[in-house]
Amino acid sequence: DTGVSQNPRHKITKRGQNVTFRCDPISEHNRLYWYRQTLGQGPEFLTYFQNEAQLEKSRLLSDRFSAERPKGSFSTLEIQRTEQGDSAMYLCARLNRDRRFYGYTFGSGTRLTVV
Amino acid sequence: QQPVQSPQAVILREGEDAVINCSSSKALYSVHWYRQKHGEAPVFLMILLKGGEQKGHEKISASFNEKKQQSSLYLTASQLSYSGTYFCGTEGGSRSTSGTYKYIFGTGTRLKVLA
């Protein structure tokens, strides 16, 4: 249990289809992040929320991507008209600012394969 | 802009030591270290804040030289469980539009420990 739950774990979709991923932080956290990771690379920042407000978006987040966090708890990431280049692991994370543990806790991720 | 890690890959025998370096071109506020096993999410190891502090976690420790904008991760008496890809995550440089420092993951170092 990483403290952040993501589903689905795997998603295979045809090019051009829309997909939606969900992230549920186990406990209440103000900040929730989305990252994308391709094979052999480090995670790349996509966007983050402070409660329900989306405060920052990376240039990686094209118009086909949209993220929401309607009640400041769970979050969704939708990709419209998927392309093969969207194939990656999509990671959700919360930022812990506890004195003993200051860092990101990542969910297990959703692996997207666009065929 | 992405922090550069060295070496890119290293193979060790159980009980041997290793050092992984993370070097940034930007002034850093903090450095985080993560380990990621194949198919899993990155797991937070430790954070170092500016001030040149050194920290330890089991037989893994790290140092942070803010003047050189570098951090090093030290793995002593390596165990099979240490195998994985290690990433540094750096906070620093310019602040984003929301007022937080940019957070960027390094290029990664693949570590393989052999019995």
Image (cartoon, coloured by chain):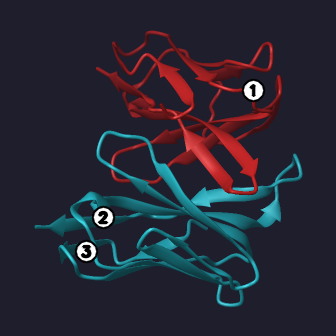
Chain colours: A red, B cyan
The residue carrying mark 1 is A28
Residue A28: image x %, image y %? 75, 26
For the residue pair A90 and B112, the one nearer the viewer reads as B112
Q: Nearer the viewer, mark 1 or mark 3?
A: 1
Q: Amino acid at mark 2?
A: Arg
- Image quadrant holding the C terminus of chain B, namely bottom left
Height in image: B38 above or below B95?
A: above
Q: Quadrant of residue B9?
A: bottom left
The residue carrying mark 3 is B10
Q: Kindly state the secondary structure of the residue where label 3 is placed.
A: strand
- Image quadrant holding the N terminus of chain B, namely bottom right
Residue visible at 13% across and 67% down in the picture: B114
Q: Label 2: how many residues lie within 10 Å, few (<14), some (14-19) or many (20+)?
A: many
For the residue pair A58 and B21, the one nearer the viewer reads as B21
The answer for which chain carries disc 2 is: B
Residue visible at 60% across and 76% down in the picture: B24
For the residue pair B80 and A42, the one nearer the viewer reads as B80
Q: Amino acid at mark 3?
A: Val
Height in image: B30 above or below A31?
A: below
Viewer can see residue A115: yes
Q: CA distance from mark 2 to mark 3?
A: 6 Å
Height in image: B28 above or below A81?
A: below
Q: Label 1: how many residues lie within 10 Å, few (<14), some (14-19) or many (20+)?
A: few
In contact (CB < 8 Å): disc 2 and disc 3 = yes
Residue B92's mark?
Answer: none
The residue carrying mark 2 is B110
| Relative to B55, B35 lies left or right | left
Q: Label 3: how many residues lie within 10 Å, few (<14), some (14-19) or many (20+)?
A: some
In contact (CB < 8 Å): disc 1 and disc 3 = no
